[in-house]
Structures are given as C-alpha cells and as structure tokens.
Amino acid sequence: MLTPISNDPRDYSWGSPTLIPALEGRQPTGAPEAEIWYGDHPGCPSRTPDGRTLDVALADAGRPALPFLLKLLAAASSLSIQAHPTRAQAQEGFAREERAGIPRDAADRLYRDDNHKPEIIVALSDRFRALVGLRPLAETRRFLSVLAATGDDVPAGVAQLQSRLAVDDDGPAAERALRDVLAWALDEADAATVASVAAALDAAADTGETEFADEIAVLRAAASDFPGDGGLIVALLMNLVTLRRGEGLFAPAGVLHAYQSGLGVELMAASDNVMRGGLTPKHVDVPELLHVLDATPAPAPVIRPRPLADGVDVYDTPVDDFLLERVTVTVAGDTVRVAVHGPTIALCTVGEVVVAGAFDSAALRPGAAVHIADEDAVEVSGTGELFLAQPGS
C-alpha cells in the first residue's frame, strides 16, 4: 500500500532560502527553509492526503512507529556542533530526567526519548560542507602553527591550544587532551580568548594561506555568526569535509558534527536526543556532552554508494535502525525493481518517477514522498532519482 505524505519546511535560522525551493521547482518565499521531515516523528509528523498526520494514520491502522526519520536538509550557515548518545546512554539519561521531573519540552532537557540517534546525510548539491569528528592531532598542530605565525606574538587562544595539545598523536593521551580542550573551550575560555582565535583566522586569510584555506573560511563565518562562542575553538579541532553529490557522511554515537552548507538527504534513527557543543544560542551541558563524546581523533567517516543492482546503490552503515538506498532510472520505459523490508519511505529528488506496488502506484516529483507498507518490492519507472529509507537488516 502506498500513501503520499507531505510536510511544510521548518524555518530554522540556519536554513537556506533557496535550495529546497530550487529542488522543488518553485519560487522562494524569502524565509529560510532548513528541513522537511518525512516520517511520523511527533516533533513534526508528515501529513497524509486525508488530513491525518502519519503518526495518527499508522496508529489507526495498528502499525508500529517508524524506527527512522527521513529529511531534506538545506543549510546556509552552521548548525550547532552536536553529538548523540548511544542507546544505553539514552535509556539511562531519559530515565534520569524523567525521575527529575524535567518537562520533555524544556529548553534544558537533553534526553527527550530513550533512543540513540546515528545519522547519515547524502549530498544533493554539487558541494556539501560539514564539520565532523575530531581531526588527527598532527594536522591540528600544523593548522595551529599557521595561525601562530600570523603576527609578532602568538594569539592567546592559539598559544593555549598549542600547549594543551602537546601530547602523543594517538591513544589515551590524545583523547584526554581533546576532552580537556573541549571542556576549557566551552566552560572556561572567555570572549577575549575566543576573539584572539577569530583574529588569527582573519590574519591567516589575509596572508593567502592555501593548505587550510577552506577551514579558515568556514571558521571565520562561524566566528561572525557566533561572536565569542567557545564553539569556535571546538570547530577548529574538527575535520572539514566537502562532499560531492551522491557522497554520504555517517555520524555514529558520540561523534561531533555540524553541517555547514548545502542540500542533502538525511536519515537518522527516530530520536531527538542532542548534546550541543557550541555555535548555538541553545542550552549546552558540557559534562553531559563529554559523557557521550567519542574523543578519538580520526579522519571523517565518508561513505560512498555501493552498487547493489542495476539502478540501485546502497549506503552501508553499521546500524539496524535504517537503510538508505538510491534508485536511478535514466531511460524512459525502463523499470527498476527494488526489494523492501518493512515500512519504507520513498523520496524523489530528481525528475519524475512512478513508484508502483502490488496494487497501487504514486507519481512523484522532487520533494514529494510516499509511505510504503505491506509490500515485498516496488517498481520505479520514469526518469529521475529516488531515495528509499527502510529499516536496517
């Protein structure tokens, strides 16, 4: 059974006013359009043609809630730096805050449910930028040496970082040093210290620095958007990744990430548990962030699609909550058959495609989606691109 679903864009301040309208082929409203949610998450459930929200429609049919949430995400400036808990951490934290009587919609509530929130984003724009994971220390020290050489005196914040990160590149010492730096940046570094790092970034840009030119540009934008925010120092420690269209980025539990710019398809476990690490006016709980943090320095976890069948690619992730596939039909008249395993959402991102089940079908254009239930497979025809989100194996 196929049920069309739709939703309104969410107008978060970091959203792009143009990327989602361009995908859907309509005029921008002038307001930021940051995300469109496709799913039954109570924070913003999709609507069905009969006017019900998808969560209500599934409950009325006796179906369980979806284990995942699919989104279109369009960023024009940095999202908050954040990390998500493991399932065990979420269960413990949720129970703790329930016992404490903290309202689930309170601004300082951290655990709004008892689930983990691994996520993957796949670039739809030609370039999608993100900060993700803590950069290997040797690279960070090289970056700091560039910032230290921008004047006669080493800027105070840069000198602090060089001193605190003068440890072995790998192992427990590196992880302890990074945890200590994050705690210092978010709890102790004053506005003047953060400003000294921002000034060093400005000076480095003026020198025509090339190796870290992209990092400098991203960090300067963050410093302008969030003046005095210690998250600038956290961001300086993170990998900057530029995804090309079709490439993905996986953020498992504990890994810091902050999307910067571009349009993507995002798929995550059905959760709203977020520990923030700066670049945000929202609540930052440093001890809880450090509790869930994976401080292992490593390159960014970029995922490239793996061919599964003709016209079907899969994005492999080590979680059982979701599976993301991309279906491409390039020749009119061709049909691509895709197996489905449980409740599925199909989202069109290019062209015009028809999704057909055993007894019904749905025509989709970019931005349109359909919920699929009680099907073993669907057939996709037309010409275009479709993403399928379904439970993991």
Image (tube, helix red, strand yellow):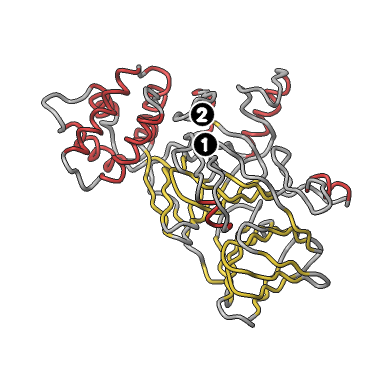
Which three-letter amino acid code belongs to the residue tagged 2? Leu
- Marks 1 and 2, how far apart at CA: 7 Å
Q: Residue at x 66, y 58 (%)?
A: 368
Pointer 1: what residue? Answer: 83
Q: Residue at x 55, y 77 (%)?
A: 330
In the rendered image, the residue lying farthest to the left is 152
Residue 109: x percent and y percent?
A: 63, 24
In this view, 121 is above or below 139 = below
Q: Residue at x 76, y 61 (%)?
A: 372
User: Under tag 2, what secondary structure?
Assistant: helix
Residue 298: x percent and y percent?
A: 38, 46
In this view, 202 is above or below 56 = above
Chain-order first, disc 1 or disc 2: 1
Marking on residue 289: 2
Tell me, yes or no, if residue 179 can be seen here. no
- Tell whether label 2 touches label 1 (CB within 8 Å): yes
Could you tell whether 240 is left or right of 38 in the image?
Answer: left
Q: Quadrant of residue 95?
A: top right
Tell me, yes or no, if residue 54 can be seen here. yes
User: Under tag 1, what secondary structure?
Assistant: strand
